[in-house]
Every structure is written in structure tokens, then in C-alpha cells.
Image (spheres, grey):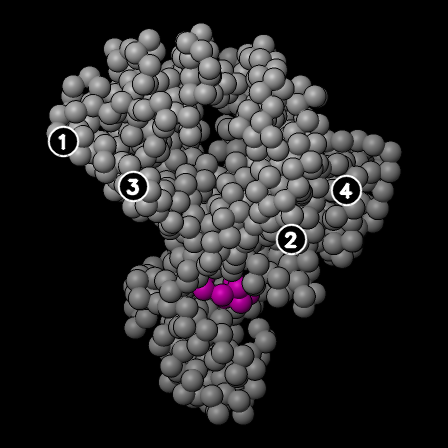
Amino acid sequence: MHALRLTIACALAFAAGALPAAEPTAFDAAAAWRGFLAKGTADDVNAAINAIDAVGYDGAGVDADKCKAQAGALAAARARVPVSMALQRAALLCAEANGDRSIAESATQAMASLARHALAEADRGAWPRPVRIVLPGDATALYASAGMSVHYEIFMQLHPAPYFPFLLAAAPVTGGPEKHIQFDYVDTLAQVDRGARAYGTPRLRMGYVDGFVGSAAKAGTVSAVDYQAFMDAAGESSPQAKVAAVRDAAANGGIGSATTWLTVCGLNPAKGCADGLVDALLPGAEARHAYPMLLLALAYAEGIGVTRDPAAAKAMLDAADKAWDRRGASVEYVELWSVLHPGVALPADLATRLREAAAAGNGTAAALALSLRMAREKGFVLSAADEAELARPENNGIGAGFMRLAGWYEDRDKKKSDAYLERAAQADNAEALRRLAYRLREAGGSKPPTAEAMAWFERAANGGDVYAMYYAGYQAYRQGNLQRAEDWMVPAAIRGDVDAMFFLASLWEDNTKGLEGDAARAAKVYESMSASEEYGARARRALSEMAIAGNGMPKDLAKARAWLEQDANAGDLESQVSLGANLLYARLGPADEVAGRRWMERAIEGKSTDAMDQFGLWLHNRGKTDADRLRGAALSRQAAEAGGVSEMNNAAWMLCVSPHAAVRNVADGMQLARKIEAMPDITPGTLDTVAACYAANNEFGHAAELQARVIAEMKRYAQPNEESIKEMTERLALYKAGKPYIESIEETATD
């Protein structure tokens, strides 16, 4: 056996335990990785890809003549990307083909060091962090150089967060159990592609997934076609549609699609749902591949697509355990079983299997068993040994063990819970990062979030936290960077976050150059969402506004009114408010005060604080009598009691700056203003109200300080409103002169 293959094979053999002492080599994989991540570029990666292709490397061999012709390019690429195992393997094969002993030894040392580093870096417990690689081919190069044959490949999740792990199951060509290792190249590429527009956001990671996996799917690669199928299934709502999305890919050997099919039919049993599933699994099971066998075992145990047969299930799972290193099949079986039986305590036979897997050296088994007991066993008591198990470094590649402990102690020992939450954040756990960032943001009140808070939000967003994506996008919008806002919002929208979808569409409505959407595309987004029972009315309200403005579609007041009336008549309070406001402000044709008031009163009867707020504002500003104005102020105060920022803002504005002496009540306005000031992420317009209240209360210094912040933030907008900035600047001059601002009756009539 070649020395390199022997070295890597030994490393793989020791993957489950301590690695043997490394022999001194000229190549230090850890140092090479540090250097590449610090200084590597996308151009370097492209050079490596080009060099690999140029020598005809196909994973198994190279073209000797091409190796000679491309020797310089290959050497240059190795210098630029020394951490690529595919590149080093190509260099080794070229050297062997052309008898270059020096390069062969150099590539051998590099490959051996990289292999050892990869296996030492891999977390061998539960919830692992994947092995870092540069290119998808690096994983197969590792196995091929170790004399192992890849059985199958599975993408482990729908979206990068921050990793996009894929599992390679391989066994020695001479026979033996499969070894399962997860690899990731997306995080590596996202770190070095510093020149990309979306650098630092999840959108760049999504781009790499779409590019690499999309190309592989077009080439017919089973795992890539499989991934696209179960991605499609995730976007479907009915079990029938989900199964239809994965059926062909599963029949073609897709493990993820087969797993989706089994779980969908297991959770939603219906006649014919699982027809064909067993046939799809049989070829893999007959080839003695562990994952298809464990899926088949679960199908027999649950009676999914086949008559329930516990004996056959046990025999099949025993066979799968023999085919999977350290009885890993039982561990994966239990995870899938727990999906099919949410909230149910683990049966004794499965608990025994996990203990046997743990005894065989499977680092996931004990943590999984403990996690299930914590979540499902009544009266469970966490022991010191249990706590130590979840806190082991091997179970915290992504901080998941720490998060379980933080959750356990949240209502039992807050100090301990917070300590584990911080440790989870240090391990880059997205939920922990978001929660800590949120606390920092809340503590800052109305001041802009600190750099530390934003850094944590952004790390959480790249780790897959949808709220953090939305928040980072919102802050980019507040800073006037609409492209950046789009790059944060798109991944959240693709993950199904409704608020992100609406925010993204609202960005596109403005037809801003440089964004990937415009008003017409925004209208299509709203139209696609209008069929939803949950948020269809919200989408139709947005479409109505676009039809009123003639933005993204022809101006059509009749259609706009019909959309609003459809939902208003069905009892949707927000649509009633929107319809009423548009009638009062003559946005659907001539003003219709009678109908507008009627719709507002109907929404108020339904306890709509939005109706109280908006109708209260209209009555105060445009009412014809003191009774109207006083009722408007009363409604506004009532709306403010719910604690919404917008409602408190409008009430405080009336109380502090109203031109009507009967309405002004600075003391009550200040109570609201101080509440607003303590709240995070208030807009410049809202901060303007707070400043006006301080001035009305003769606290002119603080009023001027706040008003300066208002102006500074408004100037950062992508399209600053100069007229509004002028008004804010005039108010600042008043405050500096020790004078309050009182709105004129003429100004209220135009609001």
C-alpha cells in the first residue's frame, strides 16, 4: 500500500478514539488552514478548481500528459490553496504518473496532515460541527486516498446555517462497516469570498449552495437531485404533494427523499401514501448499505408501506448496525422514531439499543438518550453526570448541549441558565447569539444598537436564525443601505418568514436601482401570498395600496376598493381600518366621510387599537367640532394603553403639541414619551415626538439632543426627504432657543 494511503487509513481507523502521535512533517494543516481563512480569496479557489480540471482529475485518476503541461498551474494552485485535499490528491496522482518523487512526497505529507487535521477537528459526539473543506471533492479525495469506497451521500439540512453539511458514508474496499463523516465547504467559501456583494450575509452561503448543488443536479448526481426533491417537498403543504415531490428521487436512490417520504406517511397515514417506498429502499438494503436498511427497518416496525412486522424490523436494524460503524444505525433510527412519535417516552428496547451503541464508542448515543429523557420523561431529574455529559466539548460543536442545559435551568436556576447560554453563544449557537443580542438591544432603549449587539445578531443570522436575519436587514434599511437590507431579507423570506417577505416586497415597491426586484415583482409576491388563509388579507391590502398608486400595476381604484371590501366584509379588522381610512382621506375617489366613519366605528367595536389610533388621529386633525377633537384624543389614549409604539406616539404627539388647548396635557404626554424612549428601534419620526414632548416640558437640552439624532438618522436614508429634514431642523432651532413646538391648525389639516 502507498505510504499516503496507509497513513490516512490509520487515521480513519482511529477516528473513534485517540489519534496516534503525528510524525514530524513539513506540512502543518492547522497552520495552513489559519493562513487560508485569513488571506485566501475566491480567485484562489477558482485557480484550484481550474488546476484540478486541467489535469483531468476525476476522483480516481489524472491524465499524465495534461499533468506535464499543467505542472506550473498545479504548483501555483497548491501554493494558493494548500488545504484542498482534492488538489493535493491530484498533485499526488500526477507525480505518481510522471515519476516525480519529490512532489509525490510533498503531496503525501500534505494529504496525511490534512486528513489527520480533518478527523481531529470532527466532533464525534452529538450535534456535530462538520469537517471543514474547500471543495466538495475534498471529501471524496480523503476517502479515496484511504482506500475506501463511497456508498452514498446525504445533504443534512435545507439551508446553510452557517454550515451546509453533507454526509459521506464510505467503507473499506476490502470490506467492513461504513464510516459516516459530515463535511462542509460552504462556510469556507463564504469566509474567503470577501469581494462578493453579499459577503457576510446568509445570502452568499445560499448562492454557493444553489451554484454547486444546482450544477451537480443538472449532471444527474443522485445526492443533488435528492436535495432538490426534499427541498421542494418542504415547500408543499399537503402530505400528497410532499410525497409527489420526493417519489422519483427516492426511487433513484435519494436517501433524504426516502426519509422525507417515510416520515410524511408515518405522521400522516393515508391509504396509498407509502406505496412504492419499500421498493425504493430495497436496492440499497440489498447492497448492505446501512441507511436504507435502517429506513426499511423503521418501515417494518411502523407498518409504513408494508405490513407491520416487528421481527423483520429487528433483524433489519441489527444488520444495519453491523454495517454502520459503532452501531450508528440504532442511533439514527431512534432520532427518526422520535420524529414519528413526538412527546412519547423512548421504549425500553430502543433505550437498550442506545446504551449498546454508547458502549460501542458511539459518542452521539448517550447525549441523544439524555436529551429525549429530559424532554419526554415525567419527573425527570438531571444528575451531575447528566449535566457533565451535555456539557462535554464533543456534544457542543454548535453549542446544542449547552442550549439544552440553558433551557433546563431557565426556570430552575437563572444564573446557571445564563452561564450556559453564554457558553452556547461562544460555540456559535444561533439561538443563543440572538437571545443575548436581543438583551443588549433591549438594554439600550431608543439608542441605536451597539456594535457588539449587531455583531451578535449578524452571527446569529449567518447561523440560520430567521429573526436575526430580519433584524439585520431592518437595521441596514435604517442605515440607508438597501442592497444590504435585501441581502439579509432574502434568506429569511426563502425560509418562509412572512414579515421578511412583506418587508422585501415593500423594498421593491420603491423601484430602487441596484435591487433585484421592482414594483412589478413586489406585486407578484403579494399576489402569491394572497391565497393564504393566514395572511392573504394582509397581501390584498398591500395590493390595494399599489392599485391606488398605480405602482407595479395600472391604477385601478375600483379594484383597490374591491380587495379591501372583500376582507372588511368578512370581518378582517385591519382591512376595515384600511378601507375606512382610504374613504376618509379620499384615496378611493371623492371623500366619503359617512362610509369611512362607519367602517372605523365597526372596527372599534371589534376592539381594534389600530382603528382607535387612526380614527382618533383623523377626528383630532380633521374633525369639525370640539367634540370630535376630544373624542379623537380619547380614542388615541385608549389605543396607547395597549403599549404599541405607533399608538403611543400618536397619543403623545396630540398631548404635547396639539394646537387645541383642550387636548394638550403635557404631563400625560411625557409619561408616554418616557415609555417610548425606553423602547428599542424607534423610528426618527417617533423620536421626533419624544423630543417635542421634552421641549413641551421645558427640558430643552435633552429635546435638542434627541432632535439632532432624528436629523442625523434621516440623512442616512437611501432617499432622504429634504422637506422633512428641513422641518426637523426648524424644530431643533426652536429647542435650542428654549421654545417648544406647537403644531398649527393648518398643519393638522394636511396630516
Report, in whole angstroms, how far the alpha carbon at label 3 lies from the one at label 1. 16 Å
Looking at the image, is mark 1 or mark 2 earlier in the sequence?
2
Residue at 39 percent across and 35 percent down: it is: 434
Q: Is 136 contained in the magenta span?
A: yes
The secondary structure type at the circle numbered 3 is helix
The disc placed on residue 736 is 1
Mark 4 or 3, nearer chain start: 4
User: Looking at numbered disc 4 in the image, what kind of residue is underneath it?
Assistant: Ala
Upstream in sequence: badge 4 or badge 1: 4
Quadrant position of residue 270: top right
Q: Which residues are magenta?
A: 132-140
Residue 80 in view in this figure: yes
Are the residues at dot 4 and dot 3 in contact (C-beta closer than 8 Å)? no
C-alpha gap between disc 3 and disc 2:
51 Å
For the residues labelled 4 and 1, the Cα–Cα distance comes to: 65 Å
In the displayed structure image, the side of residue 83 where residue 2 appears, left or right? right
